């Protein structure tokens, strides 16, 4: 009788490598990145985020400037004295300042000197202006108490009696128009921002449909063998969240760089007539910490919209498959 060979004891010392290899094997993603046209979608989301952040920053800037204008309504008034034959301008300025300062509710008055007047006109008439050679009105700035403003009607009457060429302007009409224009601009900016976010959502819908078309046979097989719609949608949501955040972060960083560049330019050109006029209309081109936080919030919102839109699109697609199967 042939003796069976003894079992090799070493075979029992070899661990079962198959389960380990199976655990270490990386499972292929349900939604490969190349099927989402990843780079193109990242670029589109980056551009939309960049434009959305610029719009948000512009809306913030205009809103803050409008608030400054509204505050100036109750803070300052201006007495304007037009030159006339035989009028001693310096004496008229001093008299106007004295009349205005006598009213309760006036904190102080300041005569705009020759150099400051020439500086105000420099953007239009050029440097080296001699205001004595031109019929240029002179100004007296009146600072009023916001809690208890003076009687502007009585002040106008007192100025007209003593200085017929003097007029009082409390800036209310001019600033009210600018504030109304600013509010209209803010409303238009919000509408543009909503359109950009809608365009981003539609872009993600088309990209999700394209990704599902490329993997339609896999998705349908998985769904028919029992894979829940939430599982399939989660795979899409994860991939689109990563893609959306890449594009949103890139667009947000680009927008922040633009804001920083504008702020740097405004700071470098400060104390020039052009910068003074721009600052009077648009502030310092600085959106502040609230604006930068808004940019970060915009990035998060666009990333969440990208993920949520892909999730809803997949759920709707699978629901259509179930309906067609039921009808069949």
Image (cartoon, rainbow, N blue to C red):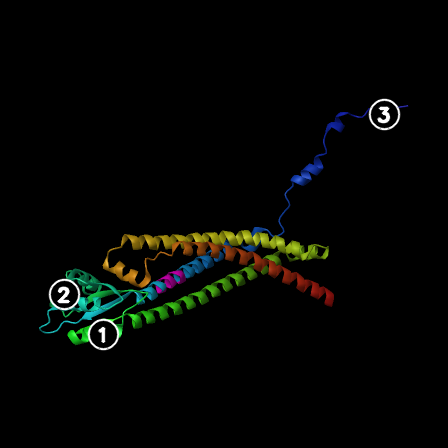
User: Which residue is rendered at x = 35% and y = 56% of the image?
Assistant: 286
Assess disc 3: are there few (<14), some (14-19) or many (≥20) residues with their C-alpha within 10 Å of its C-alpha: few
Q: Are marks 3 and 2 in contact (CB under 8 Å)?
A: no
Where residue 138 sits, quadrant-wise, is: bottom left
Q: Which mark is residue 156?
A: 1
Q: Residue furthest left?
A: 86
Whether residue 22 sits left or right of residue 101 in the image: it is right
Above or below for 7 versus 125: above
Q: Earlier in the sequence, mark 3 or mark 1?
A: 3
Q: Are marks 2 and 1 in contact (CB under 8 Å)?
A: no
Is residue 251 shown to the viewer in this render?
no
Question: If the image is split into quadrants, where does the C terminus sit?
Answer: bottom right
On the image, numbered disc 2 is attached to which residue? 131
Whether residue 53 sits left or right of residue 233 in the image: it is left
Where residue 317 sits, quadrant-wise, is: bottom right
The span picked out in magenta is: 59-66
Q: Position of residue 272 (x, y in %)?
A: 23, 57
Q: Position of residue 212 (x, y in %)?
A: 61, 58
- Between 319 and 12, which is closer to the camera in this rendering? 319
Q: Earlier in the sequence, mark 3 or mark 2?
A: 3
Assess disc 2: are there few (<14), some (14-19) or many (≥20) residues with their C-alpha within 10 Å of its C-alpha: some
- Between 161 and 60, which is closer to the camera in this rendering? 161
On the image, numbered disc 3 is attached to which residue? 4
Where residue 216 sits, quadrant-wise, is: bottom right
User: Which residue is rendered at x = 27% and y = 62% of the image?
Assistant: 277
Q: CA distance from mark 3 to mark 1?
A: 125 Å
Q: Is 266 inside the magenta-drawn segment?
A: no
């Amino acid at each position: 009788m042939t003796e069976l060979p003894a079992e090799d004891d070493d075979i029992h010392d070899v661990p079962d490598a198959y389960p380990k290899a199976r655990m270490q094997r990386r499972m292929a993603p349900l939604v490969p990145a190349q099927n989402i046209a990843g780079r193109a979608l990242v670029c589109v989301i980056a551009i939309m985020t960049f434009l959305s952040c610029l719009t948000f920053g512009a809306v913030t800037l205009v809103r803050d400037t409008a608030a400054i204008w509204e505050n100036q309504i109750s803070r300052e008034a201006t007495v304007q004295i037009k030159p006339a034959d035989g009028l001693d301008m310096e004496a008229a300025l001093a008299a106007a300042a004295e009349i205005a300062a006598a009213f309760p509710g006036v904190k102080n008055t300041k005569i705009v000197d020759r150099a400051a007047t020439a500086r105000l006109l420099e953007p239009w008439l050029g440097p080296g202006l001699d205001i004595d050679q031109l019929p240029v009105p002179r100004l007296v700035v009146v600072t009023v108490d916001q809690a208890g403003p003076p009687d502007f009607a009585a002040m106008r009457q007192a100025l007209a009696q003593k200085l017929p060429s003097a007029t009082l302007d409390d800036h209310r009409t001019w600033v009210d128009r600018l504030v109304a224009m600013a509010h209209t601009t803010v409303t238009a900016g919000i509408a543009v921002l909503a359109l950009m976010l809608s365009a981003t959502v539609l872009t993600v819908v088309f990209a999700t449909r394209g990704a599902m078309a490329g993997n339609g046979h896999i998705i349908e097989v998985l769904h028919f063998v029992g894979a829940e719609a939430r599982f399939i949608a989660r795979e899409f949501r994860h991939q689109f969240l990563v893609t959306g955040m890449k594009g949103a972060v890139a667009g947000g960083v680009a927008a922040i760089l633009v804001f920083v560049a504008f702020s740097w330019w405004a700071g470098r050109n400060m104390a020039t007539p052009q910068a003074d006029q721009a600052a009077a209309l648009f502030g310092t081109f600085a959106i502040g910490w609230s604006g930068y936080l808004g940019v970060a919030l915009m990035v998060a919102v666009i990333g969440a919209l990208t993920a949520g839109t892909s999730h809803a699109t997949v759920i709707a697609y699978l629901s259509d498959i179930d309906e067609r199967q039921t009808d069949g």
